[in-house]
Image (cartoon, rainbow, N blue to C red):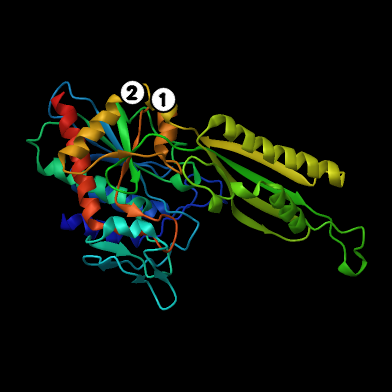
């Protein structure tokens, strides 16, 4: 599967970061730079394909037998805005020995601090140079799906139903399903290629919302500011200090929810803060959103004017509430994983995928591991061995479905 890694290394060098700030679709035009590359590669394979104005790339491999379910595969082209994504410089480490990895002169990954490294000892892995994220989330999934497409084009003798492909933009900002074309994408069910350790089958995720806060201050010369100035940046800090300390993501794990401050900027007269709110439990999720509303209301009463403007927007919900009634698609993925010699396991996602939104809108779409780790930062890495296994799992899912 040499082309798999060649593809991945090309894709990660394309800057595709999405943005919370622009409120356009896609949020950044540069995402389409990779979408256009994928469009050409899909056309070169002879597939029915198109790229729409919103930055979604679609393709279809027509069925060669009757009666098999139509299966969809979905991955996202954008990378997180949480760490630098320009001038990505990947490096391959052969047969990783389990020791500390020096990324550059000032940054290293030590196994005692990054236990994910224990899962890839002996593998060939791809790391960053420590100056950017890698883009394994989700260019591992993109490259793997492209490899699946090439396999079925090269092996027309292998029975399969219709295979639908979609590469989405803006997943990292919770908008990856906003303009999904359900009228064209006629899969009976689908899988997102957007997990980490291969073997993982994920059908629980956070309920998710975003919170945007505008803080309105009152500016006056600091020399005569006593009892007059209200600094918007201080308002933002005051609001943050009233949020529960142990709902900071740095203190949470497992099924514990969090409030995550992703951006803060401003000056004396105006400041803006962006948070993401997460919890697997719907009741606790609602409580967290209520806490934001209560604090905003309290501060407005305290200062005697509308000092805090709060807008909360739901992003997606826990797909488990729907998937639990359709476990045959989980069993299919489990059997396929076992068939290629990987031990399957289930875990709740401490995050979300496009699949959560797609599931709630009628397209069942659990998540499958891709071999990428430590997403959204400079310590991100990918296992070549696991990426190859992920491709085999997706191919086996489609083969098994055709036999039923």
View extreme (bottom): residue: 105
* Residue 185 on image: x %, y %: 32, 31
SS at badge 1: helix
Relative to 34, residue 220 above or below = below
In the picture, the disc for residue 339 is none
Image quadrant in which the C terminus is located? top left
Apparent side of residue 292 relative to residue 19 in the rendered image (left or right): right
Q: Which residue is mark 1?
A: 322
Residue 297 vs residue 14, the one in the foreground: 297
In the picture, the disc for residue 326 is 2
Apparent side of residue 129 relative to residue 304 in the rendered image (left or right): left
Choose top left, top right, bottom left or bottom right for residue 11.
bottom left
View extreme (left): residue: 157
What residue lies at 16% left-to-right and 42% top-to-bottom? 340
The crowding category of the residue bearing disc 1, from other C-alpha atoms within 10 Å (few below 14, some 14 to 19, many at least 20), is some
Residue 335 vs residue 178, the one in the foreground: 335
Q: Are discs 1 and 2 less than 8 Å apart at CB? A: yes
Q: CA distance from mark 1 to mark 2?
A: 7 Å
What residue lies at 52% left-to-right and 41% top-to-bottom? 256
* Residue 135 on image: x %, y %: 37, 57
Can residue 42 be seen in this snapshot?
A: no
Apparent side of residue 273 relative to residue 257 in the rendered image (left or right): right
* Residue 231 on image: x %, y %: 80, 58
Residue 315 vs residue 182, the one in the foreground: 315
Choose top left, top right, bottom left or bottom right for residue 335.
top left
Can residue 111 be seen in this snapshot?
A: yes
Relative to 340, residue 398 above or below = above
Relative to 108, residue 317 above or below = above
């Amino acid at each position: 599967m040499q082309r798999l890694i060649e593809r991945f290394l090309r894709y990660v060098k394309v800057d595709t970061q999405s943005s919370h700030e622009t409120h356009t679709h896609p949020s950044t035009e540069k995402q389409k730079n990779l979408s256009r590359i994928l469009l050409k590669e899909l056309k070169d394979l002879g597939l029915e394909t198109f790229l729409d104005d919103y930055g979604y790339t679609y393709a279809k491999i027509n069925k060669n037998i009757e009666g098999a379910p139509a299966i969809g595969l979905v991955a996202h082209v954008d990378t997180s805005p949480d760490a630098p994504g320009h001038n990505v410089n990947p490096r391959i480490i052969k047969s990783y020995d389990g020791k500390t990895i020096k990324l550059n002169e000032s940054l290293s990954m030590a196994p005692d601090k990054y236990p994910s490294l224990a899962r890839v000892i002996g593998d060939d892995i791809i790391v960053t140079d420590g100056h950017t994220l890698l883009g394994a989330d989700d260019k591992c999934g993109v490259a793997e799906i492209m490899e699946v497409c090439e396999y079925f084009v090269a092996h027309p003798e292998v029975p399969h139903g219709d295979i639908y492909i979609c590469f989405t933009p803006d997943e990292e900002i919770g908008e990856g399903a906003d303009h999904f074309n359900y009228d064209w994408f006629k899969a009976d069910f689908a899988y997102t290629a957007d997990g980490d350790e291969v073997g993982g089958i994920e059908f629980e995720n956070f309920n998710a919302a975003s919170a945007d806060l505008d803080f309105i201050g009152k500016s006056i010369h600091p020399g005569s500011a006593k009892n007059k100035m209200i600094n918007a940046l201080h308002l933002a800090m005051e609001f943050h200090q009233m949020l529960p300390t142990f709902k900071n993501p740095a203190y949470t794990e497992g099924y514990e929810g969090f409030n995550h401050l992703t951006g803060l900027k401003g000056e004396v007269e105006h400041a803006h803060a962006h948070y993401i709110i997460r919890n697997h439990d719907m009741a606790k999720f609602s409580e967290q959103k209520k806490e934001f509303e209560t604090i905003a209301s309290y501060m407005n009463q305290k200062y005697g004017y509308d000092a805090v403007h709060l807008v909360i927007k739901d992003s997606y919900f826990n797909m488990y509430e729907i998937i639990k009634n359709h476990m045959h698609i989980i069993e299919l993925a489990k059997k396929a994983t076992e068939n290629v010699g990987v031990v399957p396991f289930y875990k709740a996602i401490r995050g979300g995928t496009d699949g959560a939104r797609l599931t709630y809108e009628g397209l069942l779409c659990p998540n499958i591991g891709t071999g990428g780790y430590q997403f959204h930062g400079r310590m991100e890495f990918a296992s070549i061995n696991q990426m190859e296994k992920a491709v085999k799992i997706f191919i086996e899912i489609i083969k098994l479905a055709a036999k039923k």
